[in-house]
Amino acid sequence: MTAPFALFFALRRRLAASWPQWLLLLLPFVLFWRVWWPDPAVRQVFRYGDFVEQHYPMRVFVADEYRNGRLPLWDPYTFGGEPAVAMSLFAPYYPLGLWQVIFEKLPFEALELEAIFHLGLAGLFTFLFVRHLTGQAGAGLIAGLAFSLGGYLTSYPMLQLIILETAVWLPAGLWLLERGLTARALHRVALAGLVFGCGILAGHPQTFLYIAYLTAAYFLFRAICLRLPLGFVAVAAALLGGVTLGVSAAHWLPGLQMYGMSPRAGLTFDEISHGFRPAELWGLLRPNPGQWSPLYVGVIPLVLALVGLARRRAETWFWAAVTAVAVLLSLGRYGFLYPLFYRFVPGFAVFRDQERVALLVSFSLAVLAGYGVAALAGRWSAILDRPKEDVPQRRSRGLRLLIPALALFSFVDLAWANQGVILQTPPPGGYFARTPIVEHIQSVSAAGWRTSSEGLLPGDGEAGLVFQVRDIVGSGPLYLAAYDQFLAQVPEERWWRMLNVQHVITRRDLTHGALKLVRQDSDLRLYQVFQGATLAWIVHDYALAADDEAALRATASPDLDPFRRVILEQPPDVPPAPPTGPETVELVAFEHQRVVLDVTLTAPGIVVLSEIAYPGWNVRANDRGSTSLRSLRSLRAYGLLRAVALPAGRWRVEWRFEPVVAYAGLALSLTTLLLVIGLDIRAKIRYNAAV
């Protein structure tokens, strides 16, 4: 009987010690109870915004691809086709998003719960970090509460999911880094890099830029305070940075490639320097009723932060400096500091909306609040490793009651500040209701067809991912600049044909003779296009352009017939010649990452595919008398589309998406992960042998 009782009391002690962690994980679900409450009469959903328009459709696509045994490399449904693996919002390799494959179709509520769970993780990780710094569980509890339920994380990051899921790894990485530096344990530094790599995989590079600079500053600060040997500091820094970049290479390598081809690469100071106006800094002291309050951490944590700062220790001065710098940066063009960072600090000339640096304001104030709790609890002697003073029993009991009281009042304050900001009553049928227009398109569409929805599908521009409708538009922040220019310069009726558009959803009253109105719902009209659009066609004449911009200008010329002459940027290996008889192009297979055609040519010609050209789309062909395919040079037609030059004959042509950059990044990520695991196992074996 002794063993069961011993086990019971051991579990009881463990639960008693871990209640702050469990509380921090559960409180976000209490705050957002209407999201998961089963009664439809009281249930609410996340407000319409990026969460609906971008994050949910993209996660639906990623889950579907994994469920069907494919890596989510190419998205055929938005912007005419784009590399999903290079788009940060898809977050295709984020570990805590992979659970979504369990659903046959990802429920909207599942992604909402994932966001709420990440608030809990933010609180838990902050608790671990601040408890380690102060030796006080109560300090970790207040800090975790202030950061996880403060105005920053519970405002727009919840609707811009990748910001939230990137930010939560800041305290976890700092916790492991602090333990690694204190113990001079490189394997823990490597684990910190692994955690920071998860932050990159979550998909918001701007948020991680702030995390990276804070981590670098904290690393240097702690190296000086701990008087670490220069050799250890150099190895630890290289290991931290190498593991962080290595484990996340599957994400950032394809992303860098895409960024260089997107319009985002040329943003000006005026376009990216927006920030808080000085008057908005009052948000540090009080919430903004009915609006976002990203600077607000709560009255009690703010007072505790001032208490912690009053102790004038090096640690508190560091976090006070972080707060001050972050507040000044968050002003963007309205302050003096961001223009300097824009000119001289790498990364700050790339991203928009400088108020997002409020992440560092929120986190540093939360840490300072933890130091304030530690000061009130009389634990500063423990922080400085001096002998602990005796605390009278009455005072000790009062302190034990004070922490829950502070936590309760902070929770009530933050819940009141958040009320009515994130949630709304669900729309009838949900955000992605299958309207009659959607049902008609789904019922008649064939392989390769596209729809020009003008963003009017339920759920906006990325809704094609949910309905599996190949759309011309999208609403993600990254897309090909050439595609944008193609739609802007080429006449609409022409690109309808060239992009194989078979349906148009619009509020316009179109009278084009090749259009037939097949459905009208209120002010929405669905037209079917009868222009002879096709998935692929054969051309026997070409003209050369100097680059993609020149090719786009030539494609927009009123004198061009794109079905008789193709605009290329490189001469074809096989010069075309006039046909001598009937020729055909037949579709054999159309898949997300593979298109197969049977082509019959009576003379050398160029086969154009109405699909977007992008690095990694490789083409192979055989003469249909052979069983093996040989690689051919892929051409870019009209500055945008795929093409290949073929001799006369009967050919099977296959395009496959095989992005070397994506595969190299994935290999580097997996290799780094295995190395970190091996390093950690080795450290544990050596520790056990020493014990």
Image (cartoon, rainbow, N blue to C red):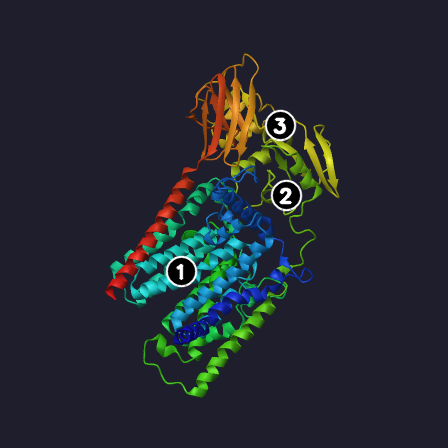
Dot 2 or dot 3: first in sequence order is 2
Distance Cα–Cα, label 1 vs label 2: 39 Å
The residue identified by callout 1 is 173
Dot 1 or dot 2: first in sequence order is 1
Q: Is residue 184 visible?
A: yes
At horizontal 68% and vertical 40% (from top left) the residue drawn is 439
The residue identified by callout 3 is 533
At horizontal 50% and vertical 27% (from top left) the residue drawn is 643
Residue 328 percent coordinates (x, y): 48, 62
| Residue type (three-letter) at the residue carrying disc 2 | Gly
Secondary structure of the residue carrying numbered label 2 = loop
What is the number of the mark on residue 455? Answer: 2
Q: Is residue 302 above or below residue 650?
A: below
| Residue type (three-letter) at the residue carrying disc 3 | Ala
Residue that protrudes farthest toward the front in the picture: 1
Q: What number of labels is visible?
A: 3
| Residue type (three-letter) at the residue carrying disc 1 | Gly
Q: Do the residues bearing badges 1 and 2 touch, measured as CB atoms within 8 Å?
A: no
Specify the quadrant that holds the N terminus: bottom left
Specify the quadrant that holds the C terminus: bottom left
